[in-house]
Amino acid sequence: MLGHYDFSESGGESGTVDAPADREADTRYALRITVFSVVAAAVLTGAIYLLAGAL
């Protein structure tokens, strides 16, 4: 799945990402999204836990 894209369902195209620099940039961006998601989930879970404990 790494290095592939598919926008065909929305009328776009599909194919592969061949340039190593583009793959590296995509991988770094995916890592940033993943880290942000994990941190956001932890913060939200902590906030709910604290609010539930205060009730």
Image (tube, rainbow, N blue to C red):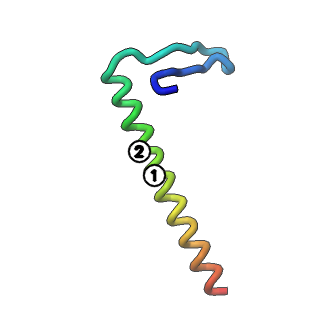
Q: Residues within 10 Å of mark 2 (few under 14, many from 20)?
A: few
Asked which secondary structure carries label 2, the reply is helix
The residue lying at 59 percent from left, 76 percent from top is: 49
Residue type for callout 1: Phe
Mark 2–mark 1 distance (CA, rounded to whole Å): 6 Å
Q: Are marks 2 and 1 in contact (CB under 8 Å)?
A: yes
Location of mark 2 (residue): 32
Of all residues shown, which one is farthest toward the left? 21
Q: Determine the image quadrant of residue 9.
A: top right
Q: Is residue 8 left or right of residue 20?
A: right
The residue lying at 52 percent from left, 13 percent from top is: 15
Labelled disc at residue 25: none
Q: Position of residue 18 (x, y in %)?
A: 39, 15
Q: Position of residue 22 (x, y in %)?
A: 36, 23
Q: Position of residue 37 (x, y in %)?
A: 50, 52
The residue lying at 50 percent from left, 21 percent from top is: 4
> Tag count in the figure?
2
Residue type for callout 2: Arg
Q: Position of residue 24 (x, y in %)?
A: 34, 29
Q: Residues within 10 Å of mark 1 (few under 14, many from 20)?
A: few
The residue lying at 41 percent from left, 37 percent from top is: 29
Asked which secondary structure carries label 1, the reply is helix
- Is 16 situated above or below 51? above
- Is 34 situated above or below 44? above
Looking at the figure, which quarter contains the C terminus? Answer: bottom right
Of all residues shown, which one is farthest toward the bottom? 54
Q: Is residue 31 left or right of residue 48?
A: left
Labelled disc at residue 36: 1
- Is 46 situated above or below 16? below
